[in-house]
Image (cartoon, rainbow, N blue to C red):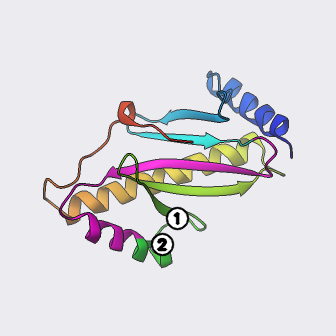
Amino acid sequence: MTQLGIEQVLSELGASIGADLKPDANGVVTLAIGDDVALSIEVPADSDFVYFHGSVKRLGGSDRVAALEDAMERNLFGLSMSGAWLALDRSSGELLLCYSSLAAGVDADKLLGTLEALAATVRALRQEESGQRGDDNTQSLSVTDHFIRV
């Protein structure tokens, strides 16, 4: 599927939810899922894949190593969404939930299902984190804090 094909799927999904889901000049569109999760969909030119990113949390200073070790452990078998992984955006210090999908065969319903599953996984990770650690070394993120570097 070409970039034009996935842009058509985004357009269809946007029409169904009443939003303009046209990717920006970098091929990225970010949308809020509920009041608490922002997910970015990256549609690189000349790629057969669509990439998804959602911020789980911003890592703090003293427990950064422990948080990264925990994320790497979760990558093995600790994520509820099959095929998803956690990664660090070093420049922002954000721990991201990431996912990729072949663009071929994606339709608006499948895209919406993927977005809902990713949002649920981000929420579950945030809830687990807030229950595990009561320290001030991590900062929760609001939708307005969200950004993706491409």
Residue highlighted by disc 1: 85
Q: Residue at x 72, y 33 (%)?
A: 10
Q: Quadrant of residue 63?
A: bottom left
Location of the C terminus by quadrant is top right
Q: How far apart are marks 2 and 1 (CA)?
A: 5 Å
Whether 12 is among the magenta residues is: no
Taking 28 as reference, is 10 left or right? right
Residue 88 image-quadrant placement: bottom left
Span of residues in magenta: 45-71
- Label 2: few (<14), some (14–19) or many (≥20) C-alpha neighbours in 10 Å: some
- Viewer-proximal residue, 147 or 16? 147
- Give the amino acid type for the residue marked by disc 1 in the picture: Trp
Q: Residue 75 carries which label?
A: 2
Report crowding for label 1: few under 14, some 14 to 19, many 20 or more residues within 10 A (C-alpha). Answer: many
Residue 99 circle label: none
Q: Where is residue 78 in the image (x, y as percent from the top left)?
A: 44, 73
Name the outermost residue toward the front.
Answer: 91
Instruction: Report x, y in % for residue 138.
Output: 22, 53
Residue drawn at the location 71% of the way across and 56% of the way down: 101
Residue 75 pos. (x, y %): 48, 72
